[in-house]
Each structure stands twice: as structure tokens, then as C-alpha cells.
Image (tube, rainbow, N blue to C red):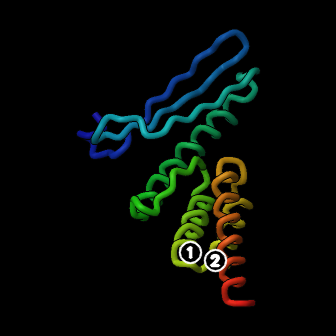
Amino acid sequence: MSKRLGADVFILGSIKRSGSLTRIAAQLISSESGEVFKSVQCESTNMEEKIFQNVDSISWMIKNSLVVSELEKEHSSSTRAVVSTYSPGAYRHFMLGINSFYHQDYNAALDYFFRALEIDSNPLQRLCFSFLFLTETLEYMIKRRSGL
């Protein structure tokens, strides 16, 4: 159906309840391949009181997942990172940090990684800290090698 409509993505959603717990879930499915490329969900007790808040959260996650998937297309497969974030800004800064790192602009890389962490610290934390460590280590080694 989505292919006939010219849509790249089909969104399949569900609402499930078990006792007092309610889960709203959505899957983003590629119209071309039929594969699920992103799943999001929101769980809550007292769903009746929070239904609009939870639906808004799912909508936000879907919108940002689509933006991040578009941003991923801008990067070559050799520099594209597997990053779990719903924040397009955090993803953009992280990838700019990666590109700066590979171009040996370590000061810019540090700045971008810190900005990514400021925007969305949880999913990006390990990756950013890994690259921060590598960047600082390389800077130190370069300074030491040049006698600074």
C-alpha cells in the first residue's frame, strides 16, 4: 500500500494493555524492502491520564528517527556510525566529530563530541567518550612527538 502511494516508510503501530500497564509501540518499515528499520515504544501506568503525552512522545521519536535516518544517508558507509539517538542535533554533532577526527582536526572533534553529549548524553555517551579518549590521546601523542 505505501509503495503504491509513493511513501518510503510505512508506520505500523499498536496499543497493548496488561493489567495497569499500557504500551504504545510503532515500527518504521521500509516500503522498498519491507524491513523494520526502527522500533519505538512508550509504556505507562495510568495511561488514561497520560495518553496524549505518550502519543506525543511516540510522534516525537518517530519524527526524529526519520530525520536521523535521512542524516545517516549523508555519510559514507565508512564513516557512518551506528548510533542510537532520537536527537538529530546530537547525531549531526557526533558525525561532525567523527569527520573531524578522521581529518585529524582533534580540537574540532572534541568540540563536536561535547556538543553531542550536551544534547543527548545517554545513547551517545559511550561512543562519544570513546572518541573523546582517542582524540585526547592522539593530541597528547602528537604534542609529545613534536616536543611541545
Label 2: which secondary element:
helix
- Outermost residue toward the left in this view: 4
Residue 101: x %, y % from top left: 57, 72
Which residue, given by chain and number where applicable, does mark 1 sit on?
Answer: 100
Q: Which residue type carries mark 2?
A: Tyr
Q: Which residue type carries mark 1?
A: Ser
Q: Which mark is residue 106?
A: 2
Q: Is residue 103 above or below residue 8?
A: below
Q: How many marks?
A: 2
> Residue visible at 70% across and 84% down?
143
Mark closer to the chain start, 2 or 1: 1
- Quarter of the image that includes the N terminus: top left
In this rendered view, identify the residue nearer to me: 117 or 145.
145
- Whether the residues at callouts 2 and 1 have beta carbons within 8 Å, the answer is yes
> Residue visible at 56% across and 21% down?
15
- Residue 134 found in image quarter: bottom right
> Residue visible at 44% across and 30% down?
12
